[in-house]
Image (tube, grey):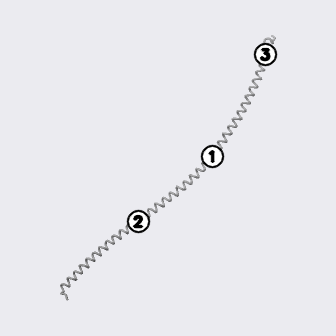
Amino acid sequence: MEPIGEYMDKVISYLKGIREKDEMVTDGIRKLKSCEDKIIRFRTDMREKQQEQRELLENEREEARKKGFEVEQLQEQLRRLTEHHEQDENELRQIASDINNQMGSLKSAWISEKEDFEATRKTLDETIKRKISVMTPSNRQD
């Protein structure tokens, strides 16, 4: 058997080795805990970012739906305005045609009236000339 001093030295040496290994394991556990905390923080951050991205995407989709609806409304309004414009153009053409027809009728009536006045004037002129010729001094008896 070994002397007790040597045996105690071996036991102390084993205990020191165990303590060193225990410290290494404890340090490893601490590092693993730190890594776990970092992973948890990373996952939490990623979840938050994903949630923010989902919300942002949903907001963008909602905006796109709103803009799509606005575009549809504006297209409908444009269609109605185009119809009104076409109706107004047709009405304007009809009014212009009516005015031209009325002007043509008025022009014809004016020309006809002018011819009547000229004929009346000519008749009156001839009548006046006849009466004057009848009243000339050679034909007059004083």
Q: Quadrant of residue 127?
A: top right
Characterize the local packing of mark 3: few (<14), some (14-19) or many (20 or more) Cα atoms within 10 angstroms.
few
Q: Secondary structure at mark 3?
A: helix
In percent of the image, x 44 and y 62: which residue is there?
A: 53
How far is disc 2 from disc 3 in space, using C-alphas? 124 Å
Question: Nearer the viewer's eye, disc 2 or disc 3?
Answer: 2
Query: Which of pointers 3 and 1 lies earlier in the amino acid sequence?
Result: 1
Name the residue that disc number 3 marks: 133
In percent of the image, x 74 and y 25: which residue is there?
A: 118
Query: Which of pointers 2 and 3 lies earlier in the amino acid sequence?
Result: 2
With respect to residue 128, does 93 lie above or below? below
| x then y, percent, for residue 80 | 60, 50
Q: Nearer the viewer, residue 33 or 120?
A: 33
Question: Nearer the viewer's eye, disc 3 or disc 1?
Answer: 1
Name the residue that disc number 1 marks: 86
In the image, 87: left or right of 127? Answer: left
Q: Secondary structure at mark 1?
A: helix
Residue furthest top as drawn? 142
Name the residue that disc number 2 marks: 46
Q: Amino acid at mark 3?
A: Ser
With respect to residue 132, does 22 lie above or below? below
